[in-house]
Amino acid sequence: MNIESKTLILYMGNPIVVNDRIGILIGKQLEKELSGKESIEYPEIREFTGSPLAFVNEISGYSKVIIIDSVATGLMEPGSVVLFSKEELLQHSSQIYLHGMNLPEAIRLREELACALPTEIKLIGIEVPRIDRFGDELSSELKGKENSIYRSVRETLFELIGF
């Protein structure tokens, strides 16, 4: 597959932070579903839990990157799924974090370092009430919504890449 058509689905979060783990939980479920369908060629899908600089390297060589992660905008009901374009990500820079640096800052850093960005970056954001506590379970605001979140994320991916 050449770079012009190379797509990466990157699910991310912090597995030890209460609600930030939702992107990983949903991504693993999606990866498990897709791994059982060998007759169809799907985009590459993998987990990311690294630093902002590692993220910059992680998206190298792809023309399209779709990120699945938590967002804490405070504008939506917890568990809501919303699609952000690269331009929208850059507008919401204070609300979308990637392990010590927010996602828009990581994208800007990549541009400032003159690294080639994928031509298309999308974030499938899962609204969370907060991401400031450690723990291995989701908060009560998200607990029990995993299946509906998964369906919404899967539907959004279908609209983006047609699987």
Image (tube, rainbow, N blue to C red):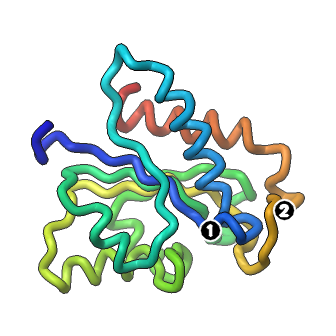
Amino acid type, residue under disc 2 in the picture: Ser
The three-letter code of the residue at mark 1 reads: Asn
Q: Are marks 2 and 1 in contact (CB under 8 Å)?
A: no
From the viewer's side, name the closer residue of 19 and 91: 19
Residue extending furthest toward the top: 39
**Nearest to the observer: residue 93 or residue 140:** 140
- The residue at the point 14 percent across, 36 percent down is 1
State the image quarter where residue 18 is shown: bottom right
Q: Residue at x 50, y 22 (%)?
A: 36
Residue visible at 21% across and 59% down? 118
Please tell me how many numbered marks the rendered image carries.
2
Residue 60 lies left or right of residue 38; in this view the side is left
- Location of residue 84 in the rendering, given as x and y in whole percent from the top left corner: 44, 58
Instruction: Give neighbour class at mark 2: few <14, some 14-19, many 20+ (Cα, 10 Å).
Output: some
Q: Residue furthest right?
A: 140
- Picture coordinates of residue 4 (x, y %)? 11, 45
Residue 82 in the figure: left or right of residue 57: right
Q: Measured along the vertical axis of the image, is residue 3 above or below residue 121? A: above
Structural crowding at the residue carrying mark 1, measured as other residues with C-alpha within 10 Å and reported as few (<14), some (14–19) or many (≥20): many
Marking on residue 139: 2
The residue labelled by disc 1 is 14
Q: CA distance from mark 2 to mark 1?
A: 14 Å
Q: Helix, strand, or loop for circle 1?
A: loop
Q: Is residue 69 left or right of residue 120?
A: right
Q: From what the image shows, is residue 31 above or below residue 103?
A: above
Circle 2: element type:
loop
- Give the quarter of the figure containing the C terminus: top left
Q: Which mark is residue 65?
A: none
Q: Position of residue 93 (x, y in %)?
A: 45, 79
